[in-house]
Image (cartoon, grey):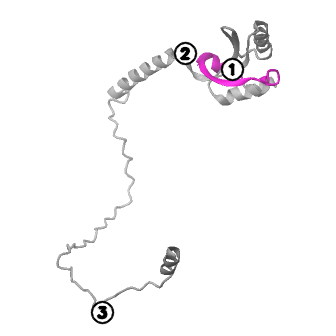
Amino acid sequence: MHLGIILISGCSKKSVVSSGSDYKEDLSTVRPRYEYVEPAVVTRPEATAPPKSNNVPKGDVDKPLYVNRKLESVLDTLAKQNKSIRYINGFRIQIYVGNVRQEADNAKSYIYQAFPDLNPYVSYTQPTYRVKVGDFMYRSDAEQYLDVIREQYASAVILADRVDIKRSLMINPASDHN
């Protein structure tokens, strides 16, 4: 019943009440007044003036500015800090997890033979051996190798790990190994 009332009232014609008198008020006395002044146009004779310099003092062109010296010292400090960083968060491919050491050694040997530019990492946490491969900065690089490695090790997966920056830069694209 309530729904019917709502529908009927929603469809009714809207009426606007308007009064017969128009409201008028003169606000010109309170508005600010501005005088428009025509800008003066100056025409110059066409003379070739020498181009202005970039405000560089002529006597100190060869001397580095104080800001440059300070900036160079900050950049040198940052470069030294960046050189001291050896490891970053990256990715490795785990190719073997199991209890048999011989299988872990076989996986390691396979990587040495098939992918000489990848470094295998064997870890042992009793009773499990894990063989991880590579130092990849980007997951996309690891995925390229993963497709090739899965032909031999179907259970291979990509894991996040701390990787050596120098070794990751020495890895060749996986397309070379197909």
Q: Amino acid at mark 2?
A: Arg
Secondary structure of the residue carrying tag 1 is loop
- Range of residues picked out in magenta: 149-172
Secondary structure of the residue carrying tag 3 is loop
Residue for point 41% across, 86% down: 15
Examine the structure image and report whether residue 169 is included in the region drawn in magenta. yes
Q: Residue furthest left?
A: 29
Q: Earlier in the sequence, mark 2 or mark 1?
A: 2
Give residue 90's position: percent from left, percent from top.
60, 23
- Disc 2/disc 3 C-alpha distance (Å): 85 Å
Q: Amino acid at mark 1?
A: Ile
The answer to which of 74 and 18 lies nearer the viewer is 18
Locate the C terminus and report the quarter of the image it occupies: top right
Circle number at residue 171: 1
Single out the mark in the foreground, 3 or 1: 3
User: What is the crowding at mark 2: few (fewer than 14 residues within 10 Å), some, or many (at least 20)?
Assistant: few
Question: What residue did someone put label 2 on?
Answer: 86
Instruction: Tell me if residue 65 can be seen.
Output: no
Question: What residue did someone put label 3 on?
Answer: 20
Q: Is residue 148 above or below residue 109?
A: below
Q: Is residue 23 left or right of residue 127?
A: left
Q: Earlier in the sequence, mark 3 or mark 1?
A: 3
Q: Quadrant of residue 131?
A: top right
Q: Is residue 35 above or below residue 63?
A: below
Residue for point 37% across, 51% down: 49
The answer to which of 129 and 26 lies nearer the viewer is 129
Instruction: Tell me if residue 59 can be seen.
Output: yes
Q: Quadrant of residue 46?
A: bottom left
Whether pointer 3 and pointer 1 mark residues with C-beta atoms closer than 8 Å, the reply is no
Single out the mark in the foreground, 2 or 3: 3
